[in-house]
Amino acid sequence: MTAKLEIACFNLESALVAHQSGADRIELCDGFDVGGTTPSVQNVNALKAASDVDLYVMIRPRGGDFVYTQQELEQMRKEIIQFKELKVDGFVFGILNEDNSIDTLRNTELVELAHPIPCTFHRAFDKVSDAFLALEQVIGCGFQTILTSGQASNVTDGVDRLAELVIKANNRIAIMPGGGLRSTNIASVQQKTRAKWYHSSAITSGSIANPNEIEALQSNLIPSQ
């Protein structure tokens, strides 16, 4: 499989830039200041009308931690049902227990609710204490991708752990490096990890993706492995 690029977009304008600049997939969310929350139905509809790029939607009721109340979980359920009707291509979420372990029960419930639409477990993964136990649990929940910086503040610092996760995943789930991924480091991260998907906001200033950065990210990926 040729390595591919997902662009995280925090608004419609950024998503349209990603579409026009050759992103292989768009992760759409809101809440730039808190690292991403559920986007509006209006933005999802507008993007689907303007783009045929695969669209993954963030399901996250608020910023902060990834331990959710029953009311917040119910909101996540409703959002998944609502976006399923809009025929999005994937969902992005992650729920932890209070000790920052994987909440297998609730995650499995939402993955099953989303079925057959694939789900990515987002960077809540980087909060767990045992990455390899968490890897097995996330696979068991039915996720198809894990977005992670390798439990470091960025992919460069986490590259060794990312490489270990790719090996241990053994093609059972995609490990997608993300977090500080830029055109200047994507080639080295790819060379070290041999991952198949890579994730970047491609933001160099403000909150809008930079089209030149997206094109540079794509051009710096090794075409095939």
Image: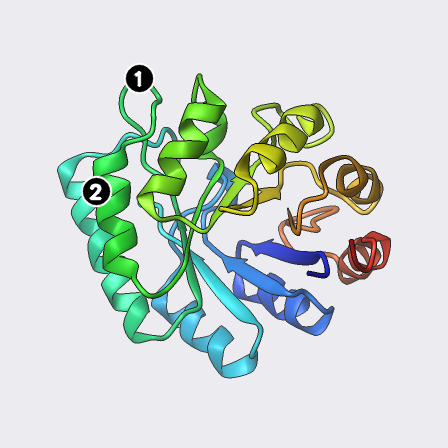
Q: Residue furthest front?
A: 170
Residue at (40%, 59%) from the top-left corner? 118
Q: In the figure, 185 relative to 17: above or below?
A: above
What crowding class fits label 1: few (fewer than 14 Cα within 10 Å), some (14-19), or many (20 or more)? few
Q: Which mark is residue 72?
A: 2
Q: Determine the image quadrant of residue 185.
A: top right
Between the C-alphas of marks 2 and 1, the distance is 18 Å
Mark 2 vs mark 1, foreground winner is 1
Residue 158: which numbered mark, if any? Answer: none
Q: Position of residue 189 (x, y in %)?
A: 76, 38
Taking depth in this image into account, of 84 and 223 the one nearest to the observer is 223
Residue 98 in view in this figure: yes
Between residue 180 and residue 147, name the one nearer to us: 147
Task: Say what amino acid the circle numbered 1 marks.
Answer: Asp
Quadrant (top left, top right, bottom left, bottom right) of the N terminus: bottom right
Give the image location of residue 74, x and y in percent.
16, 48
The residue where tag 1 is placed is 99
Q: Amino acid at mark 2?
A: Glu
Q: Position of residue 30 (x, y in %)?
A: 45, 53
